[in-house]
Image (cartoon, helix red, strand yellow):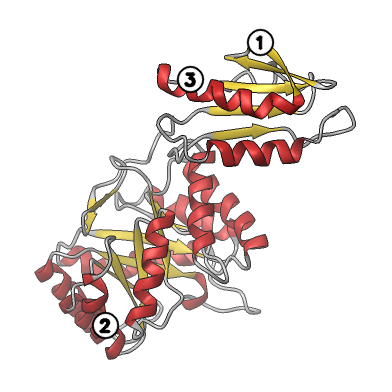
Amino acid sequence: MLQRRKTRTVSVGGLKMGSEHPVSIQSMTKTDTRDVLSTVKQIRQLEKAGCELVRVAVKDMDSARAIGEIKKQIGIPLIADIHFDHRLAIESVKRGSDKIRINPGNITKREHIEAVIDACMEAGLPIRVGINSGSIGKMAAGKGATAHEMVEALQRYLEPFRKKGFGDLIISLKASSVLTTVESYRMMASLCDYPFHIGVTAAGPPSEGIIRSSIGIGSLLLDGIGDTIRVSLTGSPLPEVDAAKRILAAVGARSFGHSIISCPTCGRCQVDLAPLVEKLQKEVEELTARPLTIAIMGCEVNGPGEAGTADIGIAFGRNRGAIFRDGEIIKTVRVSEAVEELVRMIKEQITDGPPRE
């Protein structure tokens, strides 16, 4: 089990955030917030996919005013993303936002920061102070601030929050560089007990962004750092949620269904494994009563030995597969019957009792 960095608890709508609560998944709409119909539609899609809180861009007063109507039609907490104009944050608070995100690089006047703090204190709303490397510090050769500069800038920015006794804060220190992102969070982790929202900003298209995010977010989660995550990808926000769930499951932070272990195949493999794995995935997708670790291996080398941590699985040889449970072979079946028989035994197992620890 992951040992989480100890933090205070901050409530965002009905969602509690911090080390005593599960790491939550968030995303951001790609719609124009003023278009209530499209924004609500996308948020509902995200919610169905497993998104637990959602951020919307508030670029003008009409966007802020739309929050009230959007909130009536969604079931997850809504975060107003504010840049440049502190008045948009105050209007978003009035319209029912569940949290305000401000960027220290874009809202800099002390009186403006204090006005946002006062509005959130009065409404009982939390604030995310979200540093981006590209919007603070010195810029050199198109690169953003260093981890040290980001942490120093954040510490200075938090001074009015401390002075006013405002503690309902979530912190983020994101860069497009994985290394800078990880270094920033690690540096800040020992300096406060605020929950952290983690992610790699502007990570890129899914083919690259998922890899960058998996390395960055995964490294931090394995350090026990991170209380809510976003995988920032170019394009539709739905893959962000899927990737976030997979990252959390991979590090053991949360479970979202069965975990399938399958070998990459090699010259020893005597079956066409890929379609068998795909068929198994589809068959067990709806069997969610009790998540299992399921192994499906292409040869005897990668069988019960290498997949010994699996609750149940199958290892194939020539024309047949050996089904095993907890590392012990139970029976052998023909390849043509393998997936059906494995699924039958999985259904039995998820009703018989809990998987082993």
Q: Earlier in the sequence, mark 2 or mark 3?
A: 2
Mark seen at residue 329:
1
Q: Is residue 127 above or below residue 278?
A: below
Q: Position of residue 90 (x, y in %)?
A: 20, 80
Q: Residue at x 31, y 65 (%)?
A: 128
- Please, what is the three-letter code of the amino acid marked with disc 1? Ile
Q: Position of residue 54 (x, y in %)?
A: 36, 65
Q: Position of residue 155 (x, y in %)?
A: 34, 64
Given residues 19 and 205, the one toward you in this image is 205
Given residues 146 and 256, the one toward you in this image is 256
Label 1–label 3 contact, CB within 8 A: no
Given residues 185 and 1, the one toward you in this image is 1
- Please, what is the three-letter code of the amino acid marked with disc 3? Glu
| Label 1, label 3: how far apart the Cα atoms are | 16 Å
In the picture of the structure, the residue carrying the numbered disc 2 is 66
Element carrying mark 3: helix
Viewer-nearest of discs 2 and 3: 3
In the picture of the structure, the residue carrying the numbered disc 3 is 348
